[in-house]
Image (tube, rainbow, N blue to C red):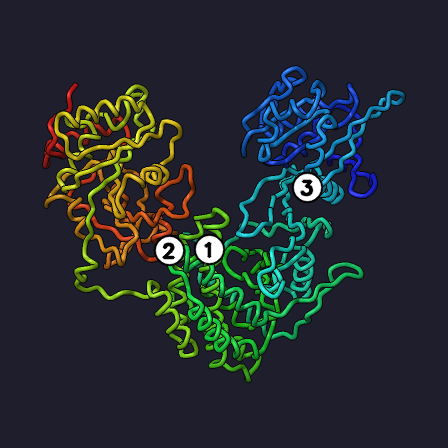
Amino acid sequence: MSEAPPKEAGGPGREIVPLPDEAATLRLGHRIGSELQPGDIVALHGPIGAGKTTLARAILRAHLGDPELEAPSPTFTLVQSYDGPAGPVVHADLYRIAGEGELVELGFEDLQTTALIVEWPERSPSLLARPRLDVALSLDTATGRREAVLSGEGALRGRMARTIALEAMVAEAGWGDARRLPMSGDASTRLYQRLEKPSGETAILMISPPRPDGPPVRRGKPYSAIARLAETVDAFVAVDRGLLAQGFSAPRIHAEDLDVGLLLIEDLGPGLVVDADGPIPDRYAEATRCLADLHGRSLPTSLPVAEGRSHTIPPYDLDAMLIEVDLLLDWYLPHVAGRDPSGSVRAEFAHAWREALEGPLTGPQTWALRDYHSPNLIWLPERDGLARVGMIDFQDAVMGPPAYDVASLLQDARVTVPPELELRLLGIYASARRAADPEFDTASFAAHYAIMAAQRATKILGIFARLDRRDGKPHYLRHLPRISDYLLRNLDHPALARLKSWFAEAVPDLFPQPVGEPTEEAAGAVIDTAMVLAAGLGQRMRPITDTLPKPLVRIGGRTMLDHALGRLRDAGIPSAVVNVHHLADQIEARIEEHAAEIGEPAVTISDERDALLETGGGVKRALPLLGETFLAMNSDSLWTESGGSNLARLIEAWRPDEMDALLLLADRDSLGYDGAGDFRRDEAGRLARRGEDDTAPYVYAGVGIFRRGSFEETPDGAFSLNLIFDRAIAAGRLYGVVLDGEWLHVGTPEAIPQAEERLAGGEAASGLRPSSS
């Protein structure tokens, strides 16, 4: 076992870290470097010979992940810059500067978002006025004792204090020699690590610092307070010990630092309640019985945390439920559905929810763990009975309607629960409740279940839209079709008739639309511009693309770019934009030849020599050159035609009132493609991602029709068109047309002769003459 990291009180807000040898200095540097983020300042104080440069080098090596980094002292250069994992890092030595003016000349004023490691920071009063981590190094020449005193303020200071507390807690608990392995997190700000001892024993480290208050959003209170979200780890500890006291399986706590927000808890293992096919019915049934058992008990509302410290489980009241459903108005409607709710729409929404929630809120109340679904349930086959269901992530527990957690499980947000399994599990729950209490009101529970499930689905639609737009986590959008389906199931209950009317008027895209003949206004659109994406590196086509851009690789005597432009000409599109980056001069030269030889479509260059922007970013930069509705295609999209122009078919199928994007799809077993497929397609042509399925029947063929408005509120730099696809799926507005012909996926040099053979055996790929040599 390794020794506990030294930590002593050094006065308010200070830690004294003894540095008996170089290894201790390196350990401190590793701690700081591991926590360093853009905008942080590390101010290194101390006399000559105190070890500032040695510590700075250790910080840089840890942060950059390079234990052999030389990191020379910037004594004479004054500054030395490095490319860090999250942005640039600057190491500065201000010993030789004469005044603040020299710092201005060095550009220090422009380094607000750069991580700075500064020796002799005292030479810059303006630097010391900013939040920072101060590290004062000292050497007692009589005893040879070195030490570092950590102080200051700001985010890095807080993270360092937490790191020191964490290492002390882990070591004191006997886990100091354990490896710390990162774990995937959830939608919250909590962090988790798995600790593994040399013996193989494991535990979970939960890092959950006290939640700072956000801005006031209603009656002077922040969202977290109104929604009854846990502010500290006290809530987790209290509910955890409460569940254990009731005989349920929750992780035992090995060690804790409540003030800092650190817990070392039992690792319940890898057991899941789902598999590749979705919910495992027997395990979901046991999890349902757990809820029935819990809900039949008389449970306390105040739970002990530590000696002299307790936690009161807050009520899941009307204010909490209303501010949660408002997330649909604030995030889902504007950013996914493309609608801005008026004041009257908001007022009716609130009135309808107040009416619906009255029954559940005035009925029986119990512990509602709030996120009781597959990601937070661990299957423990070595235990017996209900103890086989392990529970985690319950810190936001409230006193609420029993139906809430039942809905959380039976309409699992992360995996689809089929309606027939949902009904079977509802029967299991009701039977168990009636067996324990013959007075259990099944009809009342069924109504409360529909209402709570609708409330949860409405909230989650807003949360997942917020995770995408505010937090940069677009992968949550793939769950929106499932949540929408759940919501539609619930709205069919008579208790939700008023809300169903509201949703039908305010969010009509949630409801299946009848398929009929399109109106004249809805049919088609004038599409007279197209984007040909030709800026990629073509790495899989190497070594050919080391000297020749992929769009100029010849297939059947013509370049891929010529094939693409020929398809546009055949579809009657008069203007095209071609973006360039890799070996751009060659592509521009070929376009000049094309203009002289054929002339149609007319081509404009979108220059990306400065930065490769990926597919979405490339289209966004070219938007000023494109129409309100336009076609975009990869320059290497190649196919044979069987029954006329596929691009013309795509344009004819475009319905601007129903669609945000319309993609050309190919069969998954197309030539040269060995992936699992991208999309499923329903009878109306609407697309969904592969999701949890191993395969999907269709793959994106690299061609689509898009609306300019779909690119609003997208990143300014590089991003993929997948972001546009996922947002359209979430809104129920991504459609596809299946290619009439054969798609030829030419991704590698080996695929070229196969593609040429297919082209020779079918229709010519384009009306263009062969390009010149």
User: Given the image, on which type of amino acid does mark 2 rest?
Assistant: Ala
Q: Can you say which quadrant of the picture contains the N terminus? A: top right
Counting from the top left corner in percent of width and height, residue 592 is at: 20, 25
Counting from the top left corner in percent of width and height, residue 196 is at: 63, 41
- Left or right: where does residue 751 sit relative to residue 332? left
Question: Among all residues in the image, which is located at the extreme front?
Answer: 101
Residue placed under numbered mark 3 in the picture? 154
Q: CA distance from mark 2 to mark 3?
A: 39 Å
Q: Please say if 97 is above or below 693.
A: above
Q: CA distance from mark 2 to mark 1?
A: 10 Å
Question: Among all residues in the image, which is located at the extreme bottom?
Answer: 439
Residue placed under numbered mark 1 in the picture? 464
Q: Is residue 233 visible?
A: yes
Q: CA distance from mark 1 to mark 3?
A: 30 Å
User: Given the image, on which type of amino acid does mark 3 rest?
Assistant: Gly
Residue placed under numbered mark 2 in the picture? 730
Mark 1 or 3: in front is 3
Label 2 close to label 1 by CB (< 8 Å): yes
* Near-viewer residue (75 or 471): 75
Q: Secondary structure at mark 2?
A: helix
- Left or right: where does residue 691 sit relative to residue 252? left
Q: Earlier in the sequence, mark 2 or mark 1?
A: 1
Q: How many marks?
A: 3
Label 2 packing within 10 angstroms: few (<14), some (14-19), many (20+): many
